[in-house]
Image (tube, rainbow, N blue to C red):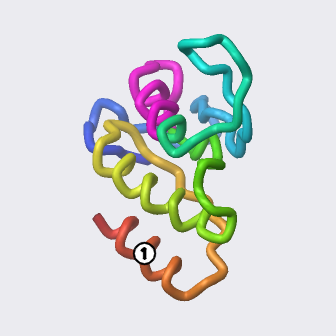
Amino acid sequence: MLTGHTPECGVLVDNNANAYINFGGGINVVDPYTGRVRQSTKADLAASARLCDALKEVSVYSRAVYPLDQPQKLLHLHTAERIRSIVEEAEKEVSVNLCLQNGPYVKLLTRITRR
């Protein structure tokens, strides 16, 4: 059983159950205000989490987009920082899958997942 902050959002994981997770790793979004395609931002990462948390059809949230408005060398650090607040705010289970190659990033991720 995977559980988020709310027990009703728990997901039974076995051979006879279905669970749905959003896609991950997007680099572009359709801007909801202009309708134009643009690079994804840190704000889009947060918005995608709120959307998936609100959709009853989505069982588990996974990082949907990369925050390309952040420096490339710090991209995963900014993603981890935003995932931390997503974990704290989400009612559902949050899947964290980041490429963290540097020691400080791993320490930050450890603090995030211990909540």
Name the image quarter holding residue 6.
Answer: top left
Query: Residue 106's x, y, as percent?
Result: 52, 79
Residue annotated with mark 1 = 108
Type of secondary structure dominating the magenta stretch: helix
The secondary structure type at the circle numbered 1 is: helix
Q: Is residue 55 left or right of residue 10?
A: right
- Whether the magenta-drawn stretch holds residue 48 is answered as yes
Label 1 Cα crowd, 10 Å radius (few <14 / some 14-19 / many 20+): some
Q: Residue furthest bottom?
A: 103
* Residue in the foreground of this view, choosing between 91 and 2: 91
Classify the position of the C terminus by image quarter: bottom left
Q: Residue at x 34, y 44 (%)?
A: 4
Residue 114 magenta? no
> Visible in this render: residue 1?
no
Residue type beneath disc 1: Leu
In magenta, the rendered stretch is: 46-60
The residue lying toward the viewer, choosing from 63 and 55, is 63
Q: Quadrant of residue 20?
A: top right
